[in-house]
Amino acid sequence: TRDRWTQTTEGEKTEGCGSLAMDRGKALPLRRSKRGWMWNQFFLLEEYTGTDMQYVGKLHSDGDRGDGSVRYVLTGEGAGTLFKIDEKSGDIHATKRLDREEKAYYILHAKAINRFTNEALEGESEFIIKIHDINDNEPRFTKDPYIATVPEMSEIGTSVIQVTATDADDATYGNSARVVYSILEGQPYFSVDPETGLIKTALPGMDREVKEHYQVVIQAKDMAGQMGGLSGTTTVSITLSDVNDNPPRFTKSLYDFKVPESTELGSAVGVIRANDADINANAEMDYRIIGSDGPGMFDISTNKSTQEGVIVLRKPLDFERKRQYSLRIQVDNVHVSPRFFSMGPFRDEATVKIQVEDVDEPPVFERSSYVMEVKEDAARNTAIGSVSASDPDGVRSPVRYSIDRRTDMDRVFNIHAGNGSVFILRQLDREESAWHNISIIATEFNNPRQISRVPVYIRVLDINDNAPTFATNYETFVCENAKANQRIQTVSATDPDEPVGGHRFFFSLAHEASGKANFSVRDNKDNTAWILTRRNSYNSLQKSTYLVPVVISDGEFPMQSSTNTLTVRVCTCDREGNMKLCNAEALTGRAGLSTGALVAILLCVIILLMIVVLFAALRRQRKKEPLIISKEDVRDNVVSYNDEGGGEEDTQAFDIGTLRNPEAIEESKQRRDIVPETFYPPVRRPAPPPARDNNNGDVRDFINQRLQENDSDPTAPPYDSLATYAYEGNGSVAESLSSLESVTTEGDQDYNYLSEWGPRFKKLADMYGGDDSDRDS
């Protein structure tokens, strides 16, 4: 076993185990100890300010004989950088100033090695170097500045805010981290607890309206506040919050306002304001009228954004009736704290005088509207009523009346411009219009811009001027086998008049028909009547319809009556009286055809005609064949173009220059009645230059040239054709070439020249060029 050794120096002890020990400072003689300690930690002061490296301690092995064969090795935290060891002597030094607040201790490992064999002489030992703290850090507050609020008028000792300062020094070693608070600025209003840093009010009755903001400086000092301790400060901004400790006050006791009498209802006539030293909700006020010599004329409301009292007009003003009003206004705080009731009533009062100013007003009608009545038979220019308006101003300007013609477009009424009497200009008809609504205008004579209007409702009273008639168009029939006194129809009446007691109609058979009547009328006394038969049977062959004249009269004065004819058809009926067959003449004569039915029938006829025409056109198109089916089918064909020119005077139909200039190049025109199988270019023969002095010779030469070209053209049609050159008419030397006139002059024509025109015209030559005896046969 290894012995335990204790090595001491002046003022401290260093423990060691085995042969590897550490010396520090001046070594004392070794002595054997019965009690040994494991050496594992050393101490080093922070913030060393010496010029040399700070000595930490010394490593020494029992195997070190001082011959330099032992090499000491140091590993761990900071080894080689913060801490260096002399390999030969084992001395350890700190190379830099150490700060405990950065790192409080370092763990290192030490061992002794044979320099030549690199074999470990001792096992690796672990030790700790602790940094001894010194008071090198001042206290620091967690905030700077602090912001706090406290209600005004708070009592002494009311907590405001707590400040906190921290010290980075070691709180377990000495008083380096023991902090004490004190107040440097802010007295005598506030105080601070030295241990906790709690700031409290120190003065009663602090008024926000006097001083609202305070700056308090708090100091925190370590070393328990002793001399030589380090300190730090912070600023605390303290604001006194508002409480409702001030009542509202009007700036003056009397307010005067002037307002024109024409001010519209709901308009503001004045604004008053009371001052309150408080702010926000504590300054909210409520205005109300507590007295007035014009009840209900005015009202007051509070503008929430400006806390002003707005006086509003509720009833119309009239300078001629009342020229001044007096109001008593009271203002109160909305939110009142019971704590400050003793500071007096939180309300104030003021008087408001409102003077009404005179303005030029329009005329005023005695009524807001007028209702007039007139009988519909009233004569023209009859007065039906009057309106009255006056100038409310002191000058009492005369008033002129007129009717707004936009409300009386038909000019049924008129009004006297001076006295306002309304009379009618046209005959009235209640059944056409029972009410007339017009607007009458009153205008000041001295100031025509001042006008006013009033509605006038005119009711047209009814008179009995219309006779009653059948309520509807009745379709009545009587059976051939009808019995006497059999009811065949119930009739009623209508009358556009409206009597006060209601309608009462009387029905009877016309006097002229009562002697030989086939039917009778029974009045039911309830505005209806029955039509009854007076014989047992009727014959439709003898008479198919009967006309029954019914007289209807009313019970009003003057009595009005009318004769209405009821048409009764005679029909064949079954045993139950149901109609089976009626005379056709009676049916059509009674029922007739409506306009819609006639239009429908006409449309059907038009559609049928269109279908027939379309069908005929399609059949005609199918039967139509080409003029020439084949080359062997050579037949006479007459093509009528229904086209006749206007002669030389017609300059639009044809260019005469083409006929006069045979050298003009004309594009070949294909026939429209056949489709050519092949195309042969036309053969053009040079023509001799025309004689310019003879226009007729030019035309003759042109025709002969075209004739020769067609005779020699193999593509020319193998049948006769007629070409119209549009060079004929009354102005032409050749006169008319139309075949329509040839009928009357056929005997005078000589067609023998046709045989000289070649085989193409042989057919025509045979038809027209023979003797008269041949044609007659």
Image: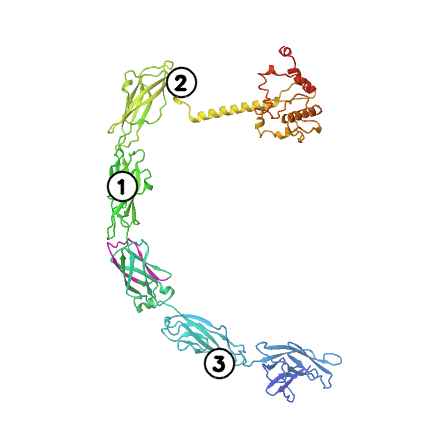
Q: In 3D space, how far apart are the residues under numbered discs 3 and 1 (Cα atoms)?
A: 109 Å
Residue 182 vs residue 107: left or right?
A: left
What amino acid type should be assigned to the residue bearing mark 1?
Answer: Ile
Q: In 3D space, how far apart are the residues under numbered discs 3 and 2 (Cα atoms)?
A: 139 Å
Dot 3: within a 10 Å radius of its alpha carbon, few (fewer than 14), some, or many (20 or more) residues?
some
Q: In which quarter of the image is residue 620?
A: top right
From the top left corner, tell me how far across and down residue 222 is, in percent: 50, 80
* Secondary structure at numbered mark 1: strand
Specify the segment rendered in magenta: 306-330
Disc on res. 224:
3
Mark 1 or 2, nearer chain start? 1
Q: Nearer the viewer, mark 1 or mark 2?
A: 1
Any part of residue 4 in sight: no
Q: In 3D space, how far apart are the residues under numbered discs 1 and 2 (Cα atoms)?
A: 60 Å
Q: Is 318 included in the stretch rendered in magenta?
A: yes
Residue under label 1 = 415
The C terminus: image quadrant: top right
The residue furthest bottom is: 29
Q: Do the residues labelled 1 and 2 touch (CB within 8 Å)?
A: no
Residue under label 2 = 585
What amino acid type should be assigned to the residue bearing mark 3?
Answer: Ala
From the top left corner, tell me how far across and down residue 129 is, in percent: 62, 79
Above or below, 153 against 408 in this view is: below
